[in-house]
């Protein structure tokens, strides 16, 4: 029943098995000395950024709902509180917090940080021996390696997500399993087993896009929980499917992308092409599909010196894929607004920013937003590549028109966020859940984490028994 469309890079029915063995061996053997200095610093910043998103996410309705379903029995802390639950419940609930406000990084599995970090923090709750900071950092890198490489082997974001799967939920459990395996010091074979077993916990559909459902907000948490569970089961003696990455009936690529993709991407250029450098940080509290257009509008306003008030029309030529994903304005829910490209542009023009505050119910219902949305016009172009960024044209009151397209949004390797901005974003988000002095302590720990002899104190720094902040809506 195997498809003939999966490219193995070699004419062999067991090619997938060999590539996943190479990837698992690489992750298991990863040491701090193997990482270029730029990758070490990049990893620290992504770790800090994800923690900020997680802490802010504890102020969401979705986090509070998931938290209330978790029995208060265990050793793992829930962020922003002093409540202890089981490690797998902590991975799920804290994973919801990490992704709920669309402020976590993207471009990995897709949302790798929001998947691996909750699983790793939960796994540390059961660690009875010191967890060295350098091992923690290497585990983060391993998670990014596996998450993105599995997605690339699935044909990339366009193919995998275009088939209707949300790759955070489908590829994410494998990333979380790899991160936990490296954190615990699994050997190459146990790491391979954990990654392979995690495929049985892969799930997550794009059906949420049609009505602003909150389902997307749960996917990262379920992926974190699934990855931790896979690592736990392998440690207890359960095996993973040995041929799940081969072109066989029931294989990962056969099921999710009907055999499309290139399995050699699992191990291509290991140690040279670092997947965390493919990931992007998010300066805007919106789906990543909106970010390049936000940058384009901001660039045009800066270049022309025109006032936002002078805009008379915003026209976007975009791919049908992006139109389906972000082309509808559903502002009745926070989840719907954050998936709206039109709202992101309207927020920028109206408020000058596209941060979390601009997605509050009061701002979503601002009369100026309602007046501006009809001026934002979408022109899907079937000739555009599925993953192309939109071309934005502004028409001003004086009749002039200016067009721009930003190929890589702010936060990417090509257009990086300044480190000062990343740290400022962390502070603003973390202060939604923790006192300022605790926030400073977390930042200090994370930015020097590779020098720590034991980082098991990190979850405690992310918790508090102070008064609970209000829910952000």
Image (cartoon, grey):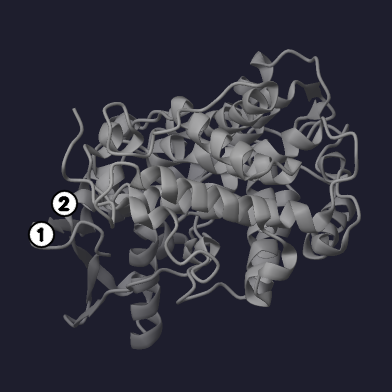
Check whether the beta carbons of the residues at disc 2 and disc 1 lie within 8 A of each other. Answer: yes
Residue 115 coordinates in the image, percent (x, y) = 57, 41
Q: Quadrant of the N terminus?
A: top left
Look at mark 1 in the image and give the residue it sits on.
381
- Left or right of 285? Residue 319 is left
Q: Is residue 120 visible?
A: yes
Q: Say above or below: 129 vs 281.
A: above
Q: Is mark 2 on a helix, strand or loop?
A: helix
Q: Residue sitting at 34 percent across and 30 percent down? A: 205
259 shown above or below 436 = above
| Residue 402 spot, x, y in % from top left | 22, 80
User: Where residue 213 is drawn, which disc sits there?
Assistant: none
Near-viewer residue (160 or 312): 160
Any part of residue 356 in sight:
no
Measure the alpha-carbon separation of dots 2 and 1.
Answer: 6 Å
Residue at figure coordinates x 59%, y 43% from the top left: 178
Residue at (22, 76) in percent of width and height: 397
- Circle 2: is it few (<14), some (14-19), or many (20+) Cα within 10 Å? many
Left or right, 347 with reference to 311: right
Q: Find residue 123 and report its image quarter.
A: top right
């Amino acid at each position: 029943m195997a498809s003939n469309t999966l490219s193995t890079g070699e004419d062999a029915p067991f090619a997938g098995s060999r590539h996943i063995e190479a990837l698992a061996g690489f992750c298991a053997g990863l040491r701090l000395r193997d990482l270029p200095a730029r990758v070490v610093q990049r990893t620290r910043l992504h770790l800090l950024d994800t923690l900020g998103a997680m802490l802010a996410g504890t102020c969401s309705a979705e986090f509070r709902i998931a938290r209330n379903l978790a029995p208060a029995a265990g050793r793992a802390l829930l962020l922003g509180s002093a409540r202890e639950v089981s490690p797998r419940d902590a991975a799920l609930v804290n994973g919801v917090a990490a992704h709920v406000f669309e402020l976590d990084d993207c471009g990995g599995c897709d949302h790798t940080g929001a998947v691996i970090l909750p699983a790793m923090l939960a796994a540390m709750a059961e660690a009875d021996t010191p967890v060295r900071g350098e091992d923690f950092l290497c585990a983060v890198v391993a998670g990014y390696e596996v998450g993105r490489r599995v997605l690339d082997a699935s044909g990339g974001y366009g193919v995998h997500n275009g088939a209707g799967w949300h790759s955070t939920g489908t590829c994410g459990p494998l990333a979380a399993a790899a991160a936990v395996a490296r954190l615990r010091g699994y050997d190459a074979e146990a790491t391979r087993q954990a990654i392979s077993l995690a495929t049985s916990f892969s799930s997550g559909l794009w059906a949420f896009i049609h009505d602003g459902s909150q389902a997307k907000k749960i996917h990262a948490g379920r992926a974190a929980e699934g990855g931790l569970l896979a690592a736990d089961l392998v440690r207890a003696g359960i095996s993973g499917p040995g041929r799940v990455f081969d072109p066989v009936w029931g294989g990962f690529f056969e099921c999710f992308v009907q055999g499309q993709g290139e399995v050699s991407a699992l191990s291509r250029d290991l140690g040279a092409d670092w997947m965390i450098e493919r990931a992007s940080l998010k300066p805007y509290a919106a789906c990543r599909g909106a970010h390049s257009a936000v940058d384009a509008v901001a660039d045009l306003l800066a270049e022309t010196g025109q006032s936002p008030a002078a805009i008379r029309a915003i026209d976007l030529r975009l791919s049908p894929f992006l139109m389906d994903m972000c082309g509808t304005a559903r502002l009745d829910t926070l989840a719907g607004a954050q998936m709206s490209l039109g709202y992101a542009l309207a927020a920028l023009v109206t408020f000058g920013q596209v941060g979390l505050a601009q997605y509050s119910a009061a701002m979503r219902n601002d009369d100026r937003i309602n007046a501006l949305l009809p001026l934002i016009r979408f022109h899907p172009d079937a000739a555009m590549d599925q993953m192309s960024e939109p071309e934005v044209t502004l028409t001003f009151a004086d009749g002039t028109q200016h067009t721009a397209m930003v190929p890589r949004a702010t936060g990417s390797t090509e257009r990086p966020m300044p480190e000062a901005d990343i740290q400022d974003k962390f502070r603003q988000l973390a202060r939604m859940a923790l006192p300022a002095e605790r926030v400073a302590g977390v930042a200090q720990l994370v930015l020097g984490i590779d020098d720590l002899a034991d980082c098991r104190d990190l979850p405690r720094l992310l918790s508090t028994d102070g008064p609970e902040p209000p829910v952000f809506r």
